[in-house]
Image (cartoon, helix red, strand yellow):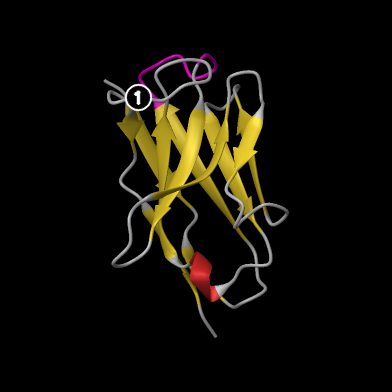
Amino acid sequence: QVQVVESGGGLVQPGGSLRLSCAVSGSIFSIYAMGWYRQAPGKQRELVATITSRGSTNYANSVKGRFTISRDNAKNTVYLQMNSLKPEDTAVYYCRRGIGPSNFGSYDYWGQGTQVTVSS
């Protein structure tokens, strides 16, 4: 059974940093694309960043230059380093395991989410 578990969220001041982690168990981690998404109150869930099995990355325009997605296949973990955080980054952040090396679909696996709050 595949499990996706996020951690690392919390309260941070504007301009601060956080690193989110997402551990995947129950499947071969290295062959799947991984992604981070977020959902703010009253808004739809949106893509933050993705990384393919080969390490190619893609970012939402709103986080380019501030966030970095990476993966450690030995630890079955994907990370999201978030720098220069803004109040508008406040959301629940979700991790997603794709259905292939570079693609996502209806039968992906999602974590339960971790809250990130950016406030002074």
Taking 14 as reference, is 11 left or right? left
User: Magenta stretch: dominant SS?
Assistant: loop
User: For numbered disc 1, what is the local secondary structure?
Assistant: loop
> Percent x, y for residue 83?
68, 61
Residue 21 shows in the view:
yes
Magenta stretch holds residue 110: no
Q: In the rendered image, which residue does mark 1 sit on?
A: 105
Q: Quadrant of residue 42?
A: bottom left
In the rendered image, which quarter contains the C terminus?
bottom right
Residue lying farthest to the right in this orientation: 65
Percent position (x, y) of residue 60? 57, 48
57 in relation to 42, above or below: above
Whole-percent x and y of residue 100? 45, 15
**51 up-or-down from 10: above or below:** above
Foreground residue among 102 and 74:
102
Q: Is residue 64 left or right of residue 51?
A: right
Residue at the farthest bottom position:
120
96 vs 70, left or right, is: left
- In the image, is residue 28 part of the stretch drawn in magenta? yes
Q: Which residue is farthest front? A: 61
Q: Total label count?
A: 1
Screen quadrant of the N terminus:
top left
Q: Amino acid at mark 1?
A: Gly
Residue at horizontal 59%, vertical 72%? 86
- 115 or 64: nearer the eye? 64
As displayed, is residue 14 above or below residue 49? below
Give coordinates of residue 102: x percent, y percent: 53, 20
Give the residue displayed 64% in from the left and 64% down from the top.
17
Answer with the quarter of the image where residue 82 lies. bottom right
* Range covered by the magenta-colored residues: 25-31
Q: Residue at x 53, y 32 (%)?
A: 77
Front-lying residue, 120 or 88: 88
